[in-house]
Amino acid sequence: MKLCDGEFLQACREVAAKYPDIKFEEMIIDNCCMQLISNPNQFDVMVLPNLYGEIVANITLGITGGPGLIPGAMIGEEFALFEVGGRHSAKDIEGKGIANPTAFLLSYSMLLRHLGLKYFAERLEKGIYRTLLESNVKTPDIEGFATSEQFTNEIIKNLH
């Protein structure tokens, strides 16, 4: 593990050196997790290998409200994958029609942005954020009573 971590860190340092205007910091995963909980606003973009990404994703899910809210992206030189950020099987809500689609929709907006469709990405994001911040239609995971369909319909209504 030390070898892989070292290789990853070296690659990050090399890329960071090419972009001196972008702040680059290194942090041991234990401290990173503690900092995420105690002072999450200090983080903007995090670049992590897979294992640490899973650990950090689970922490962010815990401090933001659950697996239905966080989008995820894995972007390489030739391919990009956009998905929900959490690895939660949601067996407790299976078949109930109350899953929060926010993470899926935000992942889709990141895909749109990646494809150069900024207008559509921004429109989708505005609909999502307007629903989350201004509407009373919310799924149970964010202290509401709406179904997934009702919440999605509210987002669609707020696209305009």
Image (tube, rainbow, N blue to C red):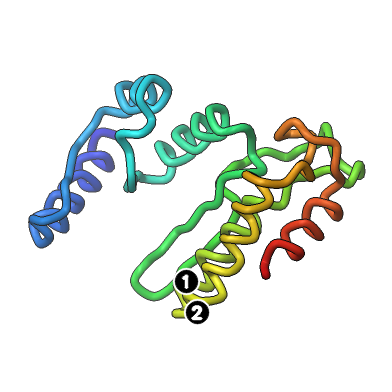
- Which residue is at the front of the view, 106 or 130? 130
Q: Which mark is residue 139?
A: none
- Which residue is at the front of the view, 154 or 89? 154
The answer to which quarter of the image holds residue 77 is: bottom left
The number of numbered discs placed on residues in the rendered structure image is 2
Q: Residues within 10 Å of mark 2 (few under 14, many from 20)?
A: few
Q: Residue at x 39, y 75 (%)?
A: 78
Q: Residue at x 72, y 52 (%)?
A: 101
Please determine whether, in this image, residue 18 is positioned above or below residue 92.
Answer: below
- Contact, mark 2 vs mark 1 (Cβ under 8 Å): yes
Please determine whether, in this image, residue 145 is positioned above or below residue 103.
Answer: above
Q: Residue at x 72, y 46 (%)?
A: 135
The answer to which quarter of the image holds residue 37 is: top left
Q: Which residue is mark 1?
A: 113
Percent coordinates x, y for residue 64 in the rendering: 55, 33
Residue type marked 1: Arg
Quick one: SS at disc 2?
loop
Residue type marked 2: Leu
Q: Residue at x 66, y 46 (%)?
A: 134
Q: Quadrant of the N terminus?
A: top left
* Cα separation between marks 2 and 1: 5 Å
Please determine whether, in this image, residue 153 is positioned above or below residue 142.
Answer: below
Q: Which residue is mark 2?
A: 117
Quick one: SS at disc 1?
helix
Please determine whether, in this image, residue 52 is positioned above or below residue 36.
Answer: below
Percent coordinates x, y for residue 95 in the rendering: 91, 44
- Which residue is at the front of the view, 141 or 74? 141
Percent coordinates x, y for residue 98 in the rendering: 84, 43
Left or right for 143, reference 1: right
